[in-house]
Every structure is written in C-alpha cells, then in structure tokens.
Amino acid sequence: MLLRLVRLDEPACKGLLDRSTLTAAHVEDAVRDILAAVRARGDGAVREYTERFDRRAPGPDGSYEVPRDRWQAAADSVDPRVRQALDVAATRIRAFHERQHQPDLEIEEGGVRLALRSTPLARVGLYVPGGTALYPSSVLMTAIPARVAGVGEIIMVTPGPSPETLLAARLAGVDRVFELGGAQAVAALAYGTHTVPRVDKIVGPGNQWVAVAKRQVFGEVDIDAVAGPSEVLIIADDTAPAAWVAADLLAQAEHDTEARAVLVTTSARLAAAVDDELERQLATLPRKDIARAAIGRYGAAVLVDSIDEAVEFANRYAPEHLELQIEDARRVASRLTTSGAIFVGRFASEAAGDYLAGANHVLPTGGAARYASPLGVYDFLKRTSIVEYDAAAAAAHAADIAVLANVEGLHAHGRSALMRSGDPS
C-alpha cells in the first residue's frame, strides 16, 4: 500500500503534525556568509556567487537586469493559448484583490483625534523560481496584489526567466526583472547594490537557500513568510470520487519530494480505493518519481470515526491547503479555523486555487496557518498611527499620563505631559 494507513490515536498520526522548518546548520552558515559578502562587496559578490552556482555571467553593462527588448520579445513569443489562460488568471486575481482595500480609520472624541492611515510600500522585491521550473502563476500572485496596493516599484528576481514568466510579469505590472537566484538574489534585494535597488519587502517562494536567506534578512527588510514544503489535507467521506481525491493528492506531491499530501477519511473503503488510484495515475504522471517519493515518505490516510474528529485533526494540523470532499461541505467549512485556504466541495480543486480561481496561492505552510494569512494587498501596505490633541484634551489627560509614567519610572514622560497642562513641575 503506497498510502500509509494510520488511525487518529496512533503515534504515527501525531508525527504528521511535526512539519518543522528548521534547516541544516551548514545551510544557515553558508547563507550567512553569502549575505555578508553581498552586503560588503555588492555586485562583485553577486557576480561571484551567480557564476559559481548558476554559471551565468552578467550582461555587457555588468548587470543581470533583463533588457526591456529581450523581455518584450520573449513575452510576445508565448503560445496564444497560454497567453489567454494567463490573461484570464490575471483578471480574476486582480478582481479579487481589488476588493481587499479597507478604508482608513479615524475617530475624534473630547479633543483627541486618532487615525490609522495606510500607505503603500515604495519598492518590493519578488522572488520567482526559475531555471527548469516555470512559475508564471507565482508572478501573478505576488505582483498583482502589490500593484493593486499601489506599490511604487516592483522588482523581480528569477534564475533564468521563461517566456511565460516574463509575460506574466508584463501582465502583472512588474517594473524590472533581474536574472538572479538563490541567497545572493535575496541579499541584493535586501541590501541593494549598484545595479539592484534595495527593496522594502521580499515575497515569493524558493528553495531552502532562499527561505533561509529571507529569514536572515528579516529586520533589514520585511518578508512574507519562511515557506516550507507545499501541503494539502483532504477530508473525504464515502461520497468522494476516489480518482479525484488521488489526483488532488498527486497534484500536491508532484511539487517536490518534501511535499505533504494527507487524506483524512471516515471510510477505510475510500482509503483503499484512493491508494489503488494513486498507483494507476502515477503510471502516466511525468513527475511520477517525485510524486511517489513524496507520497511514500510523507503521505498518509488518517482514519477517523466522524467528520467531527476530522475537523479537530485539521484544526491541529493547520494545513496550507484544505479540501472538503464531503457532504454539507460549506457547513463544515465554517468550523475550520486554521487553514491557509479551504476548498469547499468536490468541484473546488486545489489546482483551481493555484492558478485561476482568484484567491492568492501564496499561503502559510508548516502549521503557520494557525496564525498567518494568505498573501494579499494588505501585505504591501504599512499603517501609521495619527494622534492629535487640542489644548483642553492635553490638559485633561496630563495628570493620568504623569501617574502612569511615574509608575514605570519614566519621569520625563510625565513632565512632558504636565507641561502641556500649564503645570511646570
């Protein structure tokens, strides 16, 4: 049996909850060295690491920026059918994210005006995997919310952009593209070099070197998250088509050998049928070796006695993607509180969320959905508090401010408030 069968009360089931994002010490150390080198030597270090790891030299101008004419020619070469699909996806993603804007907050009472004002970030960096991988969907999912938020400039780094990726960048409103990858690309965005501008925030998926680099530069710049392997949890009952469940597990497992694909079901019969389907569908899957390794290492079918138990387990697991292939799925969805995205009913595939539905596919992984949210327009806005007093309100609050300041031993704070009340002490 390819899909490991576990029961809710078994130790193996508890082990499924442990999806640590800790990285080997040698990777942490190596990334730290790369970041330090780029910070100290700028473009020289970026070139050194890019030539070493990617065997790519800069252009005649000494930069890794993709010239506009090459960018446009590559984008124009994309197959019309792919172009149409990207157009549809971009339109749907933009329509959903345009509704995420929230009005600024302002209240005024007793001579005090308080406001919360949102302003877009000046410049953001997008990391997009490249090389042998094609991820135009990641460009749309990261760049469109930034553009909707009103970000001033969007910089994209990617190791070997495909024509499809460059078309997506044009559709989404990316301003500049650099043919850079790995920790050195993250460092260039975080610290800035002569040719790569410094950004305020870095978003987008990458391998463990990219994830570690993002974690280490956090504080110098903001980041979206430290992403772990992709994951799906599917809650299914006897009404679910086994072939669809298997296909959705494989859709997650084919990402990489570390991907997590877990079924939670009330039906041993369904679990067995899904396992049979996995074998059948793997036979013709181009990335079957990757998917088989992921399922074999991390896949499981968790048997539960009821949907209530499935809900409880899912809320503890906090999956990136959660599918509900069950009866009355919408009612059950209201009880699930810790998922990055919930796909309600058998017709809502996780693949639809990855590409075309319109909700963002940049989601918290590794259990971070307990406290984190999908990428959105709000991630590209910063908020500023506004505080305004008139003279009467300043005088009325001064004594209480001074009392609290004295409790904390911060006497200059109290004096500052009292001066505005006419009390020189």
Image (cartoon, rainbow, N blue to C red):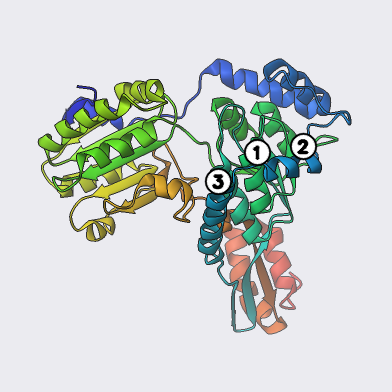
One can see residue 340 in this view: no
Image quadrant occupied by the C terminus: bottom right
For image coordinates 39% across by 20% down, the residue present is 289
318 or 79, nearer to the observer: 79
In what element is the residue under mark 1? helix
In what element is the residue under mark 2? loop
Q: Amino acid at mark 2?
A: Val
Q: Does residue 315 appear to the left or right of 10 in the view shown?
A: right
* Mark 3 in CB contact with mark 2 (< 8 angstroms): no
171 or 304, nearer to the observer: 171
Residue 105 placement (x, y as % from top left): 58, 73
Q: Amino acid at mark 3?
A: Val
For image coordinates 41% across by 29% down, the residue present is 20
* Mark 1 in CB contact with mark 2 (< 8 angstroms): no
**Badge number at residue 163:** 1
Category of crowding for the residue at label 1, using alpha-carbon neighbours closer than 10 angstroms: few (below 14), some (14–19), many (at least 20): many
Image quadrant occupied by the N terminus: top left
* Mark 3 in CB contact with mark 1 (< 8 angstroms): no
Q: Depth-wise, is mark 1 or mark 2 nearer the camera?
A: 1
Q: Quadrant of residue 402?
A: bottom right
For image coordinates 65% across by 38% down, the residue present is 163
339 or 162, nearer to the observer: 162
The residue carrying mark 3 is 82
